[in-house]
Image (cartoon, rainbow, N blue to C red):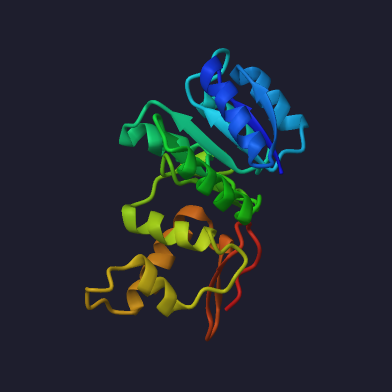
Amino acid sequence: MRLLLVEDEPRLGRALVRGLSAEGFAVDLATDGRDGLERARHGDYDAVVLDVMLPEMSGFEVVRALREDRNWVPVLMLSAKDGDYDQAEGLDTGADDYLTKPFSYVVLLARLRALLRRGAPERPTVLAAGALTLDPASRRVTRSGAEVVLTAREYALLEYLIRRVGEVVPKIELLDHVWDAAEDTDPNVVEVYVGYLRRKIGRGALETVRGAGYRLVGDEGSQVG
C-alpha cells in the first residue's frame, strides 16, 4: 500500500516514515501543504496522512481542494488542535478521520487499516441533484446558484432525499427518518412538507410515484402521478 505523509515537523515525519515503512507501507513524505496537494493530485496513493498546521496551505485547505477535484483518496488528519470545532471542520471539509496529537502509534495504524479497508468510494462534501446543491456543513441549499431558504424540517426532508437521489423513498421511511419517532405524527404530514418543498425547489424536481413514495430527480422533468 502506498501512503502520502504530509507533515512539516521533521522529527515526527521521520519517525512516521520509519514506522510505517517497517509495517510494509511505501511512504512518500511532503513537508508543506502545497507540495502535499500536488503529490496527492498526481500520485496513485491508497491513503493520505495529513497534518493540519502546515506551511503554504493548511491541511483543511488541502483536503477541501482534493474533494473539489473529486479526488476521493482516504485522508486521515493529524493535529495538535483537539477542539470539537477543529475536528468538525476537518471532517466537514472532507477528511475521513481525525487524530489528535499526541497520539498512539498503534491507534494510528488501526485507523489507517480501517480507511484502507473502506477504499475510496465517491463521497462529496456538497450533495447535488441536477441544479440543486446541499452543503451539510453550512446547511446551505442552492438551486441554479441561487440560495433556497428552508425551514429546519424542509431541510431535513431534502437532505434525506438528496442522499437517495434517483431512488424511490417510501413515505413511511421519510416519516421514520425525518420526524421524531417518539411523536405520534400523522403520515399525511409528509405530503404537506413535500408540497412546501416543491414550491421552493421546483415541482419537477421531486416526483410522486403512486403507491411507492417520492423520488428526487433534481431537474425540471415532468412529475409522475
State the image coordinates of residue 203 (x, y, percent, origin top left).
54, 62
Q: Nearer the viewer, residue 185 or 69?
A: 69
The C terminus lies in quadrant: bottom right
Residue 223 appears in the figure: yes
Q: Position of residue 70 (x, y in %)?
A: 68, 41
- Decide: is 65 above or below 182: above
Numbered label tally: 0
> Which of the 4 image quadrants contains residue 156?
bottom left
Which residue is rendered at x = 28% and y = 73% of the image? 181
Q: Is residue 153 above or below residue 7?
A: below
Direction from residue 90 to residue 16 in the image, left or right: right
Please give the name of the residue rendered at 52% of the width and 86% of the height, measured from the top-left corner: 211
Tell me residue 29's x, y (percent).
66, 24
Which residue is situated farthest in the bottom direction here?
Answer: 211
195 or 76: nearer the viewer: 76
* Apparent side of residue 101 relative to residue 64 in the rendered image (left or right): left
Residue at the outermost top position? 56
Give the quadrant of the N terminus.
top right
Q: Position of residue 95 (x, y in %)?
A: 52, 40
User: Among all residues in the image, which is located at the extreme front?
Assistant: 22
In the displayed structure, 27 sits above or below 115; it is: above
For the question of whether residue 65 can be seen, the reply is no
In this picture, residue 125 sits left or right of residue 178? right
Left or right: 77 in relation to 175 = right
Q: What residue sits 66% from the left and 63% below the top?
A: 221
Q: At x 62% / y 36%, what residue is drawn?
A: 20
